[in-house]
Amino acid sequence: MPSHPRFRRLALSGLAAGAAFALLTGCAGSPAPADGGDSTEDAISGQIIWADFGGPTNESRQVAYFDGFYDETGVEVVSTSIEDAVYYSQLEGDQGDYDTFQVSTRDLVGYPDHVVEIPEEAQGDMVPEQYRPYVLGGFYIGVAQGWLTETFPDGGPQDWADFFDTEKFPGKRAWPGAPSSFDASYEIALLADGVDPDDLYPMDIERATAKLDTIRGDLVFYQAYPEVQQLLSSGSASIAVSVTGQFTALSRAGMDVTVQWNQAFQSLNGFVLPDTSNNPEAVKALAIWINDPANQAVFTERTLYGPVNSAVFDELPEDVQDDVVNAPSHDAMIEWDEVWRGENRDLLLNSYTEWLAG
């Protein structure tokens, strides 16, 4: 658990939560009270600049969350592609363009001082308590290996050791090639080299890179996640390591895709409200809207990313539930040690950058 004191404050006061909820129910065009009353009771207005990674996941947010929120409040959510330089600057307390932006749990661990608590009604009960007051629009991503089912008609890799076995399972492997995309790379290599999941941390970087070197010639590096779909569908790679949303997109396009959930990784992602946001009250209202089980179920069914509100599973068709990242049936998944990863972000980034450069 992070030692920073911010993560020991686990809940909002009832007054703050109630005020934020009132924002959601107000009429977007209502005038300010004549007596100069508390502005937190006023209706929300304006727009929200929302920064994420775009693609089909953002399109699903538009359908599941943003369209209905606009219809209800008149507040438009304007999506933009997230840039590391902008959001890290805002995490450090500088001014920036984003009203809310996507982060990993590792970012929360490393930069806790300039994010604002959200209303209790917006907090997902499946988010760990130390992060719960700060994560809005949360979802669980999976990082796994996947392939077109026809590539291995007799069955594909069963674990990460099989992924490294290019004789038994021939073909190129699509592999993250951007320095900031080191997520899971070292963990995968160590698991393939025989390290027990319980013994991954602290990570032995030298051992991990040595293992990666053994299949370097079989790796096809991609710079952005959507490239995974092209590499698999064209046959340029037989197996890919990716966030599972890319496999979902291929399935939605009519392709038969197998995802190996054994030893796959489950990680909390979400959005934060920076203290430099230009429209914080609207963001808080949007956060409540997103946490509604019916709204979140639409996003979950479209993306198969895991919900943070446990009531969402009651809204999902039974034939969908087992495909969701944090489905109860996925009992062999691994969770990263986000505290260690947050504390060692520079080490991971710099060493992976060096390894990619050869």
Image (cartoon, helix red, strand yellow):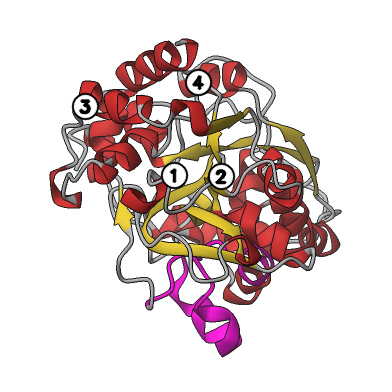
Query: Which residue lies under the disc numbered 2?
Result: 171
Q: Is residue 103 above or below residue 317?
A: above
Residue 213: horizontal and vertical position, in percent? 36, 24
The mark lying in front, picked from 2 and 4, is 2
Q: Report how far apart the C-alphas of labels 3 and 1 lie in the structure.
A: 20 Å
Please report whichever mark, 2 or 3, sits nearer to the chain's N-terminal start.
Answer: 2
The mark lying in front, picked from 3 and 4, is 3
Q: Report how far apart the C-alphas of labels 2 and 3 lie in the structure.
A: 24 Å
Instruction: Please name the residue shown 55% across and 89% down the image.
Output: 318
Query: Which residue lies under the disc numbered 3?
Result: 207
**Label 3 SS:** helix
Query: Which residue lies under the disc numbered 1?
Result: 166
Callout 3 touching callout 1 (CB < 8 Å):
no
Q: Report how far apart the C-alphas of labels 2 and 1 lie in the structure.
A: 7 Å
Residue 31: horizontal and vertical position, in percent? 82, 50
Q: Report how far apart the C-alphas of labels 2 and 4 lie in the structure.
A: 24 Å
Type of amino acid at the residue the image marks with label 1: Thr
Instruction: Please name the residue shown 30% across and 52% down the image.
Output: 335
